[in-house]
Image (cartoon, rainbow, N blue to C red):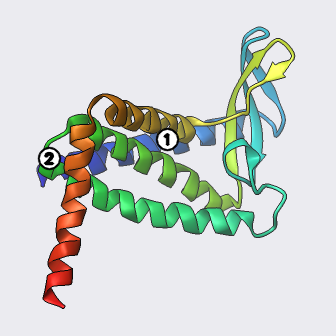
Amino acid sequence: MISALIGYLFSIILVILDQVSKYLIVKNIPLFGQKVIIKDFFSLYYCQNTGSAFSMFADKSWGIYFLSIVSLALSFLIVVAIYQSMKIKSFWLRLSFVLFLAGAIGNLIDRFRLKYVVDFLRFDFGSYTFPIFNFADICAVVATALLLILVIFDNKTIDKFLTLFEKKGKKNDSKN
């Protein structure tokens, strides 16, 4: 139980870092304003994203609501996953879920509060600008990378984790 609480606390700290970074950007850089950090490569560029990754659903009036519902549902599932991951004692699996939770909640707060997500990390590669993102997005990407590494190199951990849910389902089926 303590391990899960530490994971939830770490998620909260990451969400706070995400929200503080967004607050600082909004207060110090005007919308579509830019502060160059590394010329022709990295800058802080304040923009508002009403969609999801790569601005998917940004042109749909219902998009922000759909994404909010999906993020909220995923957040609840991830809270359960963090708790369940304690049973197999995998730090890396638990860390991936903690990072997913922080990323989902960080952007969910923006969607509920602002009806858009504050993005500000901009990387330019010649004439190509990578889609602008934020700290919550970094959490989600690192979580995805960790999970993929586990699937590829430690699929026994993933199998153990998934088995936890199969056993519950079988117990419920046998009661009926």
One can see residue 23 in this view = yes
Q: How dense is the environment of label 1, judged by Cα within 10 Å: few (below 14), some, or many (20 and up)?
A: many
Q: What residue type is labelled 2?
A: Ile
Left or right of 77 in this view: 176: left
Q: What residue type is labelled 1?
A: Ala
Left or right of 12 in this view: 123: right
| Residue 18 on image: x %, y % | 52, 41
Is there a contact, CB below 8 Å, between mark 2 and mark 1? Answer: no
Where 53 falls versus 124 (above or below)? Answer: below
Question: Which of the pair 79/110 is nearer the observer?
Answer: 79
Mark whose residue sits in front, 2 or 1: 2
| Residue 149 on image: x %, y % | 37, 30
* Secondary structure at numbered mark 1: helix
Q: Residue at x 57, y 51 (%)?
A: 107
Q: Residue at x 14, y 83 (%)?
A: 174
Q: Which residue is drawn at 29% across and 61% down?
A: 80
One can see residue 5 in this view = no
* Secondary structure at numbered mark 2: helix
Q: How dense is the environment of label 2, judged by Cα within 10 Å: few (below 14), some, or many (20 and up)?
A: some
Specify the quadrant that holds the N terminus. Answer: bottom left
Specify the quadrant that holds the C terminus. Answer: bottom left
Sequence-wise, which precedes: disc 2 or disc 1? Answer: 2
Q: Say which residue label 1 marks.
A: 140
| Residue 130 on image: x %, y % | 74, 27
Where 82 falls versus 27 (above or below)? Answer: below
Residue extending furthest bottom? 176
Residue 30: quarter of image = top right
Disc 2 to disc 1, C-alpha distance: 22 Å
Question: Which of the pair 106/60 is nearer the observer?
Answer: 60
Question: Which of the pair 120/88 is nearer the observer?
Answer: 88
Q: Say which residue label 2 marks.
A: 88
